[in-house]
Image (cartoon, helix red, strand yellow):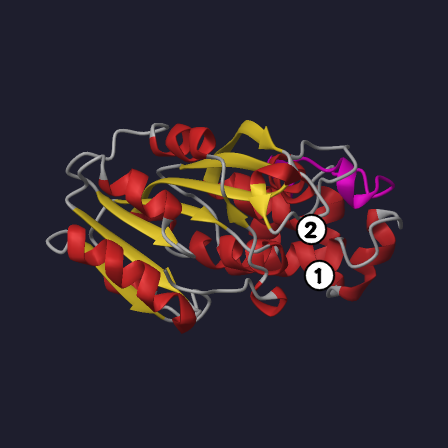
Amino acid sequence: MFSFHPKKKFGQNFLKNKDLLKKISELKDFENKLVLEIGPGKGALTEYLLKKQPEKLIAIEKDEELKPFLLKIQKKYSINFEIIFQDALRYEYSKLKGKKIFLVANLPYHIATTLVIKWLKYIENFESIIIMVQREVAERLSAKVSTKFYGRTSILVQLHSDVKKIFDVSPENFHPQPKVNSSVIELSPKSNLNFNYEKVDELLKICFAQRRKKLKNNLNKISHSNLEKIIKSGIDLNLRPQDISIENYVMMSNLLI
C-alpha cells in the first residue's frame, strides 16, 4: 500500500464518494472518445472513466509523488491510458489540435479560473468540459447580467460556451474536507465564434477595474475617439459594468480601434 499525504500547496482535495465518481463518469458517453483528465490524483475518477472504454485517456498530474498510484492503474489499462507529469497551467494544449476532446477535472480551487480562461483559447478542440470547482466559481462562470457574480470571467466563458451547473458536492465527500461547497459544471463549446478575443478582454479589464463605478468613469481610460464611438452606439454609460449585456460588450469591443 502506497503512503501519501495531500498537499495544501497543490490544493489537493480528493473526491472519495464512489457514487459521485460513478455519476461523473456517466455524464457523457466516453466510449471510443479522447478524454483528457486534469489532476487525476490517486486515480479514483480515472478508473471509472477507463471502464467507459475511451479510445484514449490522457491524465495530466503535477504531483509526481502520486506516480505509484497512477502507474498501478496504467498497468491495468496500458493500451489506452497515458500519464503526463506536468503542471496543467504549462501544458501545451495546442498539441491536441484537430482532435475533439472530452475534458474532465476536479480542479484545485486556487487555479480553477486561470485554467478555464486558458482553455478558452483552445475551445474548438473540446467536445465538452466537465469540471468540479468551488461553488462560488461555478456561480461566477454561469452568472447572468446584473447579478452579484457577473463579471469579466462570466462574459469570456459564456462567449465561448454554454455553462450548465449539474450538481453540488458537499465537503464531507472529499479527503481532506475543504471548507467550502463544490459544484460540477459542464461547458459546452459554441461554434462560429464571431468576436475578437483580445479586444473584448481588453475592454472588460477596463470596465470591471472598478465595478462599483459607472461605465463612463471607467471608460475615461480609453482614447477620445473610441469613447465617442461608444457614446454614439447608444449604450447607457450611466450603468455599472455588471449591468451591460454580453452582446453589448461585444458590440463596444468591435468599435475599438
The residue lying at 54 percent from left, 39 percent from top is 158
Q: Are marks 1 and 2 in contact (CB under 8 Å)?
A: yes
**Magenta segment range?**
235-249
Quarter of the image that includes the N terminus: bottom left
**Camera-side residue: 78 or 196?**
78
Q: Callout 2, which amino acid?
A: Lys
Q: Which residue is mark 2?
A: 229
Is 99 placed left or right of 230 in the picture?
A: left
Q: Is residue 56 magenta?
A: no
**Category of crowding for the residue at label 1, using alpha-carbon neighbours closer than 10 angstroms: few (below 14), some (14–19), many (at least 20):** few
Q: Callout 1, which amino acid?
A: Ser
In what element is the residue under mark 1? Answer: helix
Q: Is residue 171 above or below residue 75?
A: above
Indicate the quadrant where residue 135 lies.
Answer: top right
Quarter of the image that includes the C terminus: bottom right
Is 91 placed left or right of 213 in the picture?
A: left
> Residue 108: x, y in percent?
56, 56
Q: Is residue 201 visible?
A: yes
Is 89 placed left or right of 208 in the picture?
A: left
Indicate the quadrant where residue 3 lies.
Answer: bottom left
> Residue 94: x, y in percent?
30, 63
Q: Is residue 240 magenta?
A: yes
The residue lying at 38 percent from left, 31 percent from top is 22
Q: Which residue is mark 1?
A: 225
